[in-house]
Image (cartoon, rainbow, N blue to C red):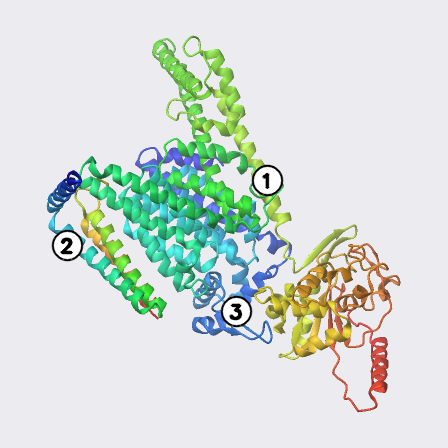
């Protein structure tokens, strides 16, 4: 048992050390993703307590949060310098795509909100 | 057929040749579009520019409404002219993609001052979209296998009979635009997968939205793409591009699908869509695992693998009932495969093999698409339409690869020939050595693929024989190694000739299918006999009579097959139509048709019906008439109203209307309306569809009167007689009086339109 806990401790420590090395802009995106996911979770919990009556409102709220998080993850993948697949993609282009995708997403959500 | 090849060859060369290849490619695509459009015009040339069959009439009517009243009215449209007295909410129960597309085209043309009627636009929507579909096929195949294969696949798709059957000019149905949307969505998915660009992911979601708008078959996409993602994950091909291609599609696609009224909350509530969410979760787990693996070396990897495997297994066990629930419909027969995809069926295996040679994400997607489509088409004949594009893409790849190998070897041999003649002695040693290397190389390939012996010594003779065999079985060839294989001159020329002959057979079959098998509009019928061509235009005659001679608000009862046509062409209210959403209502009409006259009159009168329309083919031998459909009316009616019993209409289990027919049969309304005064035509009452004389020849109608019969007696329209004023005590007398008057009327009134 103590061995397993020490293993886990080591794991978490090395994870934290590795994460500390990521650039600041990526950390900001990570924070954004965590915030969006947390908002989605709050809405799900609220739905569990109060009920899902205006179902389209609940759906658009949760999907808006998850969608934002997913798009931010996509952006993070694209602007990450370590990622070899997107070397020739300039970060400006990636950000423009991200904005466009978000625009479409939130237009749809505004339509769906009812 | 050779054009695509020249363009691929050109594309490989210098910049000038590249530009030339681009222009040639564009020109070829234009020609393919023209071909796809014009091969579907046989129905217009042979008949005329009309909407076909039943469902397209409904779509046409919806489009008319849309172009007249605008989009907002269309969403809120409550149609009170069908399913009287219930009505139907049209805006919320149709897939609006097709009508919106045609409405937009019409509006665009009109604002450009090109005054086309809505009907013309509707007739030509399907051919236009099949041209679009062949271009989309080009794009998809190009992503998977390059330009040459793309052009080949586009040319094949432009004339594949399976697709022609649903998209000839005039068959204005959902599938016409949906197949384009399907292929284009797949193209954008593969494009996103290849580039990893969020821009294409957005376009992909929008294209998926168009597909959801236009056809219920969109569930195929939302199941196939998750399967492909899962396949990529399981085979260890996960990449961040896969994440970008899939995750935004699920979120945006689900939201967009929920916007379409007919789908609505089904997009998150029904089991067809669960697979995509499950794979969405799996993808996130895998992405997280890969991310952590990138941060941290091998420690967590084992844990991650076990996790993925367990989740994948639960997915598979969940997924199977979804497939099982689809398999309700009729499976197709082998001849229908041959009829609909013809020689493509033999080219597909070669295409699969060449897809595996360098297996990329795109080509694995194409193979997966084919496999699932084959499965679904085997389950249900309607889904043959989904198989056709996959078959076209793979045979395009196969043909293109085969041509590639053959033309390259011809080119090589030719250049060797030309090199030979000027410098005979000097280069001979080098040349022979190169030839020997190539031959040993090809020998190696042969041995590797066919597992025979004789690897080193004297390969030439044996080789040649073997290669000829290979050339005979043409489609198997493209699986050979690409760079090194050089076939002898005569074998490759023979192979090219054989391939061209094969293509020729395919083209001939397609044109035949387009011209003869799939072009009949079924609203105008023709028959060829010794004294020339006969045209039966009775349906439109009857509908025109209805629209000119009856009141606007009159209700017309008929079997549901003719509901859409009556509302669209005669603009009269009908009781039931092809939407068949309310079984009880249909059963009521079926019961009325199979009841005796008085009971039927009461049912119809309670539904406010003024006219009854029956379709009768006994005079001209039109087999799909109401007498042949009658048993279905009895069954459906009896299913809801148990006093209608099917055995009452059958004599010893046989359905017949001649002298041996049961009295219930010979007294029911359908029999009477169809055969009323039929004996006057030839004196015997000989029914040409059933092939015998009818059972009850001379009878009078008491509660209905004949108002119109078309030229060939194919449509007969009757009017319900009004109720008599009842005077107490004189009831009996009146009844007999009414009978007398009806006989008088029938006797006096000869059908003036005969």
Location of mark 1 (residue): B338
For mark 1, does the 10 Å Cα neighbourhood hold few (<14), some (14 to 19), or many (20 or more) residues? some
Location of mark 2 (residue): A28
Location of mark 3 (residue): B64
Q: In this view of the protein, can residue B558 be seen by the observer?
A: no
Q: Quadrant of residue B618?
A: bottom right
**Residue closest to the eye, B549 or B110:** B549
Q: Chain of mark 1?
A: B
**Residue closest to the eye, B684 or B666:** B666
Q: Is residue B443 left or right of residue A13?
A: right
Tell me what residue is drawn at x 22 percent, y 46 percent.
Answer: A89
Callout 2: SS: helix
- Quadrant in the picture for the C terminus of chain B: bottom right
Whether discs 2 and 1 lie on one chain: the answer is: no
- Of circles 1 and 3, which is in front? 1
State the separation of the CA atoms marked 2 and 3.
Answer: 54 Å
Tell me what residue is drawn at x 51 percent, y 26 percent.
Answer: B495
Whether discs 2 and 3 lie on one chain: the answer is: no
């Amino acid at each position: 048992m103590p061995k397993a806990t020490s293993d886990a401790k080591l794991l978490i420590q090395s994870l934290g050390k590795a994460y500390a090395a990521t650039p600041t802009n990526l950390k900001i995106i990570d924070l954004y993703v965590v915030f969006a996911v947390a908002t989605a979770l709050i809405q799900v919990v609220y739905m569990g307590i109060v009920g899902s009556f205006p179902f389209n409102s609940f759906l658009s709220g949760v999907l808006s949060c998850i969608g934002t998080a997913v798009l931010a993850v996509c952006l993070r993948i694209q602007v990450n310098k370590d990622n070899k697949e997107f070397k020739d993609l300039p970060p400006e282009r990636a950000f423009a795509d991200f904005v466009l995708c978000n625009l479409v997403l939130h237009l749809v959500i505004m339509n769906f909100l009812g | 057929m050779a054009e695509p090849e020249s363009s691929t060859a050109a594309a490989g060369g210098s910049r000038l040749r590249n530009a030339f290849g681009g222009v040639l490619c564009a020109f070829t695509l234009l020609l393919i579009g023209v071909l796809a459009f014009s091969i579907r015009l046989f129905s217009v040339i042979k008949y005329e520019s009309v909407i076909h069959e039943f469902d397209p009439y409904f779509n046409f009517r919806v489009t008319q409404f849309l172009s007249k009243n605008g989009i907002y009215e269309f969403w809120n449209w409550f149609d009170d002219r069908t399913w009287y007295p219930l009505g139907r909410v049209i805006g919320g129960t149709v897939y609006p993609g097709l009508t919106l597309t045609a409405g937009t085209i019409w509006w665009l043309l009109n604002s450009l001052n090109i005054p086309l009627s809505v009907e013309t636009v509707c007739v030509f929507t399907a051919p236009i979209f099949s041209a679009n579909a062949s271009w989309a096929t080009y794009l998809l195949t190009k992503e998977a296998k390059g330009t040459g294969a793309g052009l080949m696949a586009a040319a094949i798709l432009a004339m594949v009979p399976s697709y022609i059957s649903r998209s000839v000019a005039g068959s204005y149905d959902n599938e016409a635009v949906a197949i384009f949307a399907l292929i284009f969505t797949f193209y954008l998915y593969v494009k996103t997968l290849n580039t990893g660009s969020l821009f294409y992911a957005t376009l992909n979601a929008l294209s998926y939205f168009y597909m959801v708008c236009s056809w219920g078959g969109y569930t195929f996409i939302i199941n196939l793409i998750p399967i492909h993602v899962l396949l990529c994950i399981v085979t260890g091909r996960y990449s961040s591009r896969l994440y970008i291609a899939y995750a935004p599609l699920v979120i945006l696609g689900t939201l967009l699908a929920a916007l379409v009224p007919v789908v609505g909350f089904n997009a998150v509530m029904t089991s067809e869509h669960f697979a995509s969410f499950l794979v969405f979760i799996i993808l996130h787990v895998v992405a997280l695992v890969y991310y952590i693996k990138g941060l941290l070396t091998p420690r967590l990897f084992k844990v991650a693998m076990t996790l993925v495997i367990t989740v994948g297994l639960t997915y598979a066990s969940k997924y199977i009932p979804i497939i099982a629930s689809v398999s309700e419909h009729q499976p197709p027969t082998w001849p229908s495969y041959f009829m609909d995809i013809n020689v493509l069926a033999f080219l597909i295996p070669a295409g699969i093999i060449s897809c595996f040679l360098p297996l990329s994400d795109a080509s694995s997607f194409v193979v997966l698409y084919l496999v699932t489509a084959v499965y679904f088409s085997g389950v249900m004949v309607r889904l043959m339409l989904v198989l056709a594009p996959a078959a076209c893409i793979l045979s395009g790849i196969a043909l293109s690869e085969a041509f590639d190998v053959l033309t390259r070897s011809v080119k090589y041999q030719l250049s060797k020939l030309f090199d030979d003649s000027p410098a005979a002695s000097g280069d001979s040693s080098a040349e022979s050595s190169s030839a020997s290397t190539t031959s040993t190389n090809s020998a190696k390939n042969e041995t590797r693929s066919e597992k025979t012996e004789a690897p080193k010594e004297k390969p030439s003779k044996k080789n040649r024989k073997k290669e000829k065999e290979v050339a005979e079985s043409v489609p198997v060839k493209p699986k050979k190694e690409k760079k090194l294989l050089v076939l002898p001159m005569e074998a490759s020329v023979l192979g090219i000739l054989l391939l061209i002959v094969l293509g020729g057979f395919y083209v001939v079959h397609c044109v035949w299918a387009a011209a003869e098998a799939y072009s009949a509009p079924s609203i105008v019928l023709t028959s060829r006999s010794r004294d020339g061509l006969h045209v039966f235009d009775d349906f439109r005659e009857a509908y025109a009579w209805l629209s000119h001679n009856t009141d606007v608000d009159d209700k017309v009862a008929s079997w549901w097959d003719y509901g859409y046509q009556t509302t669209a062409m005669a603009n009269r209210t009908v009781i039931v139509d092809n939407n068949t959403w309310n079984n009880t209502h249909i059963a009521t009409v079926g019961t009325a048709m199979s009841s005796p006259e008085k009971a039927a009159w009461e049912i119809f009168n309670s539904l406010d019906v003024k006219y009854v329309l029956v379709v009768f083919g006994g005079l001209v031998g039109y087999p799909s008439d109401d007498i042949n459909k009658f048993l279905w009316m009895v069954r459906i009616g009896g299913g809801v109203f148990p006093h209608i019993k099917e055995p009452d209409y059958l004599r010893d289990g046989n359905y017949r209307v001649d002298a041996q027919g049961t009295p219930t049969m010979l007294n029911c309304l359908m029999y009477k309306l169809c055969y009323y005064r039929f004996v006057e035509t030839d004196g015997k009452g000989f029914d040409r569809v059933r092939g015998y004389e009818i059972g009850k020849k001379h009878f009078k109608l008491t509660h209905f009167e004949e108002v119109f019969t078309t030229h060939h007696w194919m449509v007969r329209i009757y009017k319900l007689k009004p109720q008599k004023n009842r005077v107490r005590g004189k009831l009996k007398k009146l009844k007999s009086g009414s009978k007398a008057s009806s006989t008088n009327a029938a006797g006096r009134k000869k059908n003036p339109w005969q």
